[in-house]
Image (cartoon, rainbow, N blue to C red):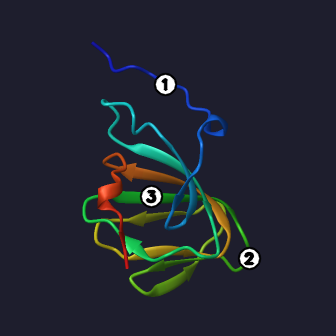
């Protein structure tokens, strides 16, 4: 037996506030999904945070000219078309306005989001 396939329309998902800004979270409701996928609008007030168990991959869709990612206190510039691999335990935040796709493995669990 195969797992169910699903088409997701992010426009139909209500955004929720997160440490980064506003996230539209998809696929976490599928018991067979090994990941969740979030479309995130990064805001200027993004907070540094970490996860004990989640691995995240940020794929940058849109970014201002001064956009950066902070990984364990080190800032690096980012631009559309890049991705950032963030293993568990790495303190991170996006700096500047941007829009990303966030791949979260295993699927997102709010109990594994720790704000610094």
Q: Position of residue 68 (x, y in %)?
A: 59, 78
**C-alpha gap between disc 2 and disc 1:** 35 Å
| Residue nearest the viewer, comparing 72 with 51 | 51
Residue count near mark 2 (Cα–Cα under 10 Å), binned few <14, some 14–19, many ≥20 = few
Q: Quadrant of residue 115?
A: bottom left
Q: Are marks 2 and 3 in contact (CB under 8 Å)?
A: no
Q: Quadrant of residue 79?
A: bottom right
- Residue drawn at (33%, 51%), measured in percent from left and top? 109
Label located before the other in sequence (2 or 3): 3
Q: Quadrant of residue 95?
A: bottom right
Q: Is residue 55 above or below residue 114?
A: above
- Residue drawn at (45%, 51%), measured in percent from left and top? 103
Which structural element holds mark 3? Answer: strand
Nearest-to-viewer mark from 2 and 1: 1
Label located before the other in sequence (3 or 1): 1
Q: Position of residue 17 (x, y in %)?
A: 54, 58
Q: Position of residue 96 (x, y in %)?
A: 65, 76
Q: Quadrant of the N terminus?
A: top left
The residue carrying mark 3 is: 57
Residue count near mark 1 (Cα–Cα under 10 Å), binned few <14, some 14–19, many ≥20 = few
Label located before the other in sequence (2 or 1): 1
**C-alpha gap between disc 2 and disc 3:** 21 Å
| Residue nearest the viewer, comparing 103 with 26 | 26
The residue carrying mark 1 is: 6
Nearest-to-viewer mark from 3 and 1: 1
Which structural element holds mark 1? Answer: loop
**C-alpha gap between disc 3 and disc 1:** 21 Å
Q: Is residue 50 above or below residue 75?
A: above
Q: Position of residue 38 (x, y in %)?
A: 51, 49
The residue carrying mark 2 is: 65
Question: Could you tell whether 100 is left or right of 27 in the image?
Answer: right
């Amino acid at each position: 037996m195969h797992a169910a396939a699903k088409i997701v329309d992010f426009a139909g998902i209500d955004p929720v506030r997160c440490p980064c800004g506003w996230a539209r979270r998809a696929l976490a409701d599928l018991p067979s999904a090994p990941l969740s996928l979030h479309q995130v609008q990064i805001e200027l007030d993004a907070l540094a945070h970490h996860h004990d168990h989640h691995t995240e991959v940020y794929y940058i869709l849109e970014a201002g000219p001064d956009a950066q990612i902070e990984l364990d206190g080190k800032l690096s510039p980012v631009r559309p078309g890049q991705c950032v691999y963030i293993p568990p335990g790495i303190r991170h935040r996006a700096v500047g306005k941007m829009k990303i796709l966030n791949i979260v493995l295993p699927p997102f669990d709010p109990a594994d989001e720790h704000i610094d």
